[in-house]
Image (cartoon, rainbow, N blue to C red):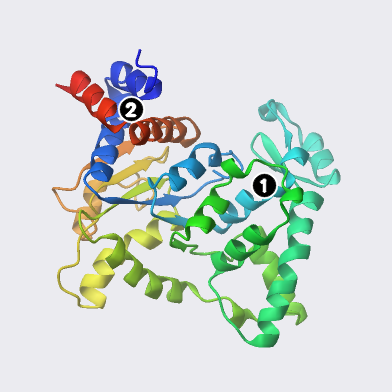
């Protein structure tokens, strides 16, 4: 076993067929794209922040393995929650056997369960609310406007480090903010803080106009995509389905057909980790080939679908990529050894 590349070698040696082969091949193609100078854009649905994907995602951002993101409002805010309220989370490993009465007790204890873990309302929701509402009020008075993630970028960098309960090295939102990578948060209204913001708008404490719209996000992304796709192009790595993936991947045909621009590069790589199956009208479970018909991918695009649990697969891929980044020559030799 190569002591510098244990995860990479494990995957190369053992992942031979079925979803394991898709994982191996997606990993190799990802690394080769980065090595050639390409960039990678991540679309992240689900509750990945609550699942602590930041443990591997944050260092991957810092090491230049991720260059842009599309995330749900929930993933955005929950990365911040994990930083400021980590010690107050409670796990429920036996969640499958909870009764309605058990979940009612969780509610009464001011916790909000996400599968096998729970977010503490007071230490997370209300603590962050007390910090972000003044910024909304200030923006309302000054009539300034920002994208949804920019409020969180500003806040997470200003929070007193003494209030950190989670590790800064494991907070992907902090890593993204410090590196100022482009982010889109489509449908941010569908999140806890989207609801909280709506309530303050309704109560008259804040103006809805201080948050730039999803349409403005796409307008901004037109420019961001063209910058990201310079050179060897930008790949698309997707966890789950829904709007986090649907929104940004459409930028290519929109630039071509709606903006009527020439020489728009297609996505240079595509990988989706999902347990959603192909069914009638299911975009989340649609095969990559379908995206060719929408001019998002081409027949030459490296395409991978890993039908598995992202909380298992993504950390493996990211850990192997971090090993590759730290030891590129050894990584390439190892890849050649196991793939010839």
Please tell me which residue is depicted at 41% across the width and 41% down the height of the picture: 276
Q: Residue furthest top?
A: 1
On the picture, is 323 further left or further right than 260?
A: right
Per the rendering, the mark at residue 335 is none
Q: Position of residue 112 (x, y in %)?
A: 73, 46
**Mark 1: secondary structure:** helix
CA–CA distance in space, label 2 to label 1: 33 Å
Badge 1: how crowded within 10 Å, few (<14), some, or many (20+)?
A: many
Badge 2: residue crowd in 10 Å (few <14, some 14–19, many ≥20): some
Q: Which residue is mark 2?
A: 19
Query: Can see residue 306?
Result: yes
Location of residue 52 with respect to 238 vertically, above or below = above
**Which numbered disc covers residue 83?**
1
Residue 287 seen anywhere in this rendered image of the structure: no
Residue 324 position (above or below residue 241): above
Q: Nearer the viewer, mark 2 or mark 1?
A: 1
**Relative vertical location of residue 197 with respect to residue 233 in this rendering, above or below:** below
Q: Which quadrant holds the C terminus? A: top left
Residue 244: percent from the left, percent from the top?
45, 56
How far across and how far down the image is residue 332, in percent?
A: 23, 29
Residue found at x 53% / y 39%: 53
């Amino acid at each position: 076993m190569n002591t510098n590349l244990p995860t990479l070698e494990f995957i190369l040696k053992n992942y031979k067929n079925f979803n394991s082969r898709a994982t191996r091949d997606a990993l190799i193609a990802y690394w080769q794209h980065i090595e050639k100078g390409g960039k990678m854009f991540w679309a992240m649905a689900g509750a990945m922040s609550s699942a602590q994907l930041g443990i591997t995602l944050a260092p991957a951002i810092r090491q230049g393995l991720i260059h842009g993101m599309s995330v749900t409002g929930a993933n955005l805010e929950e990365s911040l929650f994990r930083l400021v309220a980590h010690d107050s989370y409670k796990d429920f490993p036996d969640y499958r056997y909870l009764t309605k009465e058990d979940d009612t007790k969780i509610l009464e204890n001011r916790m909000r369960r996400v599968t096998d873990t729970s977010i503490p309302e007071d230490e997370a929701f209300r603590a962050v609310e007390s910090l972000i509402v003044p910024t909304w009020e200030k923006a309302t008075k000054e009539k300034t406007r920002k994208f949804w993630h920019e409020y969180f970028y500003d806040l997470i960098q200003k929070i007193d480090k003494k209030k950190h309960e989670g590790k800064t090295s494991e907070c992907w939102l902090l890593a993204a903010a410090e590196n100022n990578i482009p982010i889109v948060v489509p449908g941010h209204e569908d999140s806890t803080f989207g609801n909280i913001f709506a309530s303050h708008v309704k109560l008259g404490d804040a103006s809805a106009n201080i948050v730039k719209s999803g349409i403005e996000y796409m307008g901004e992304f037109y420019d961001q995509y063209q910058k990201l796709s310079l050179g060897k192009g930008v790949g698309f790595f997707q966890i789950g389905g829904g709007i986090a993936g649907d929104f940004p991947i459409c930028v290519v045909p929109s630039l071509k057909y709606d903006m009527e621009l020439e020489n728009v590069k297609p996505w240079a790589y595509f990988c989706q980790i999902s347990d959603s199956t192909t069914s009638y009208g299911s975009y989340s479970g649609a095969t990559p080939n379908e995206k060719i018909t929408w001019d998002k991918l081409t027949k030459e695009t490296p395409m991978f679908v890993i039908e598995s649990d992202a909380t298992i697969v993504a950390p493996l891929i990211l850990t192997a990529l971090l090993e590759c980044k730290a030891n590129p020559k050894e990584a390439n030799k190892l890849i050649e050894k196991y793939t010839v």
